[in-house]
Image (spheres, grey):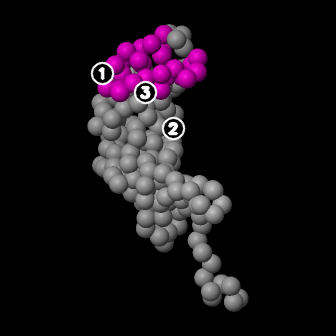
Amino acid sequence: MNTQEALDSAQSILNGLAYSSSRPEENRLDAILPPQNLKPAVEALLVKPGWGYLSAITGLDHPDYEVDPATNLRKPLADQGSVEVLYHFCNGAAVTTLRVMLPYSDPTLDSICDIVSAATLYERELMELFGVELTGTPNKEHLILPDDWPEGVYPLRKSFSGFAKSSESEKG
C-alpha cells in the first residue's frame, strides 16, 4: 500500500468517528475527534485492519489570553483555555493524527493503554506536564517531574512561568 492509499484507508476507517479531517501535507491526515470517539478510532485503526502503529502522543496548550493595557502584551490565563491531545499513527510514510480538544475545566480522556500498552509513557507525560486526566491508565506515577512537584502546576502550559524565589533563598 502506498502513502496515498494508506491515507485514503485511514480516512475511510475514521469516517463517522471524526468531526472533520484534512490533509495538511502530502503524507498526513489529521482527524478531529470528540473525546468519546478516541478509543473507537484507535481500535478501528489498530485492531481490525491493523492500519499502522502508534508513534507518539503529544499535547498542545491553547490558553485564553488577557491583554495588559499598559504594555499591550498578551498574558495566558491559567484557568481558561484548552489542551489538545494528538495521537500520531504511522503506516510507512503515511501519518494519521487523531486530534482531541479538552477544556481546562474538564481535561479528562479515556486511556488507550488497554489497546496500546506502550501508550503509558506518553499518557504519564500528558498527566504531569499538561494536566490531562487519563481515566483507566495503569500507571499514574511521575515520569519526569519529581515526586514532590506541586499538585496542579503543569510546566508545559503556557501560563507556567516558573516558581517565585523564596525570601530564604534570596538571603543565602
Could you tell me which residue is drawn at 69 percent across and 89 percent down?
171
Is the residue marked by circle 2 packed among few (<14), some (14-19), or many (20+) residues within 10 Å? some
Does the image show residue 48?
Answer: no
Of callouts 3 and 2, the N-terminal one = 3
Lateral position of residue 7 relative to residue 26, left or right:
left
User: How far, Cα to Cα, is label 3 from label 1?
Assistant: 11 Å
Q: Given the current orientation, which residue lies at the most extreme front position?
A: 69
- Tell me the element at label 1: loop
The residue labelled by disc 3 is 31
Under mark 3, the amino acid is: Ala
Looking at the image, residue 97 lies above or below residue 145: above
Under mark 1, the amino acid is: Gly
The residue labelled by disc 2 is 56
Is the residue marked by circle 1 packed among few (<14), some (14-19), or many (20+) residues within 10 Å? few
Image coords of residue 106 (percent x, y): 33, 52
Q: Given the current orientation, which residue lies at the most extreme right position?
A: 172
User: How far, Cα to Cα, is label 2 from label 1?
Assistant: 24 Å
Could you tell me which residue is drawn at 52 percent across and 11 percent down?
4
User: How far, Cα to Cα, is label 3 from label 2?
Assistant: 15 Å
- Tell me the element at label 2: strand
Image coords of residue 172 (percent x, y): 71, 88
The residue labelled by disc 1 is 16
Along the line of sight, the residue nearer the viewer: 57 or 16? 16
Q: Within the magenta stretch, is there residue 71?
A: no
- Tell me the element at label 3: strand
The magenta-colored residue range is 5-31
Under mark 2, the amino acid is: Ala
Could you tell me which residue is drawn at 62 percent across and 78 percent down?
165
The residue mark sitting in front, 2 or 1, is: 1
Is the residue marked by circle 3 packed among few (<14), some (14-19), or many (20+) residues within 10 Å? many
Of callouts 2 and 1, the N-terminal one = 1
